[in-house]
Image (cartoon, rainbow, N blue to C red):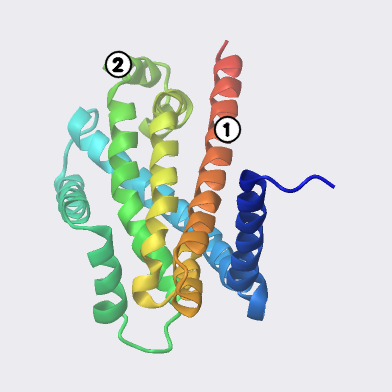
Amino acid sequence: MRPLSFDRIVGVIFMEQLKEKFYTNFIAEQRWRYVTEGLSTTFIVTIFAILLGIVIGFIVAIIRSTADRKVTKKGIILSAADGICRFYLTVIRGTPVMIQLLIMYYVIFTSPDISKRFVAILSFGINSGAYVAEILRSGIMSIEKGQFEAGRSLGLTYIQTMRHIIIPQAFRNVLPAVANEFICLLKETSICGYIALTDITHGANVIRSQTYEPLMPLLAAAFIYLLVVTLMSIGVTRLEKKLRTDER
């Protein structure tokens, strides 16, 4: 029987240590549940925050683009709404999302019975809405004003013109930027641990605090984020291709 070489011995020892660390970090005491629970929380917060951000962003973008385009008479109501939207965009885009999350949880919602997931969804949704609004507004403003006038000359109302002519073109133009914002939102949810909400990052930190071995749980969290972001990017790429095909 041939004796094992030094490299082979080192490799065997390394693999045994790796298996032991994996068992300690994930299998022992079912610590893998911190990661799966965190993954579930991350998905829930991200999805509902995206939906809220789209709603807020769409409303703000319509108001801001209408005021900027001056395609309708700018009355008192539109001026007031435009002023509120400008203030909202300035405050939200000018302050860190972590501060917004902490204010939302510790100042606005002071009750200990409030759902942490609800607070996180509301905070990230409001924050994302500001960036989505500016992205959509830039897409709407990129459409030539003549298309507004053409729609109105055909007898369409302002809402119908926006719905059937402007919004579809603007959406195709800004889809990559909107998708990038959603990817950023997914990664921003990693600060949920500041309000003791177990997301992927917080779950990895809990394992690290119990095993005193930071490498493996943090690498696992990084791998999960990378995998999810990659899948989202693939999905967006396919959607872009489909929209370009439909446009032709």
Compared with 16, 225 (above or below) is above
Is 248 left, or right, of 145 in this rendering?
Answer: right
| Label 2 SS | loop
Q: Position of residue 124 (x, y in %)?
A: 37, 59
Which residue is located at x 61 percent, y 22 percent?
A: 242
Q: Position of residue 141 (x, y in %)?
A: 27, 26
Disc 1 crowd, CA 10 A, few/some/many (<14, 14-19, 20+) = few
Which residue is located at x 50 percent, y 57 percent?
A: 221
Q: Point out which mark residue 210 bears.
A: none
- Front: mark 1 or 2: 1
Residue 70 visible (yes or no): no
Disc 2 crowd, CA 10 A, few/some/many (<14, 14-19, 20+) = few
Q: CA distance from mark 1 to mark 2?
A: 31 Å
In the rendered image, which quarter contains the C terminus? top right
User: Is residue 193 or residue 94 the one in the foreground?
Assistant: 193
Compared with 102, 165 (above or below) is above
Q: Amino acid at mark 1?
A: Ile
Residue 17 visible (yes or no): yes
Q: Quadrant of residue 143?
A: top left
Which residue is located at x 20 percent, y 54 percent?
A: 88
Is 99 left, or right, of 184 in this rendering?
Answer: left
Q: Which residue is mark 1?
A: 234
Q: Which residue is mark 2?
A: 144
Q: Amino acid at mark 2?
A: Glu
Residue at the extreme right of the image, as rendered:
1
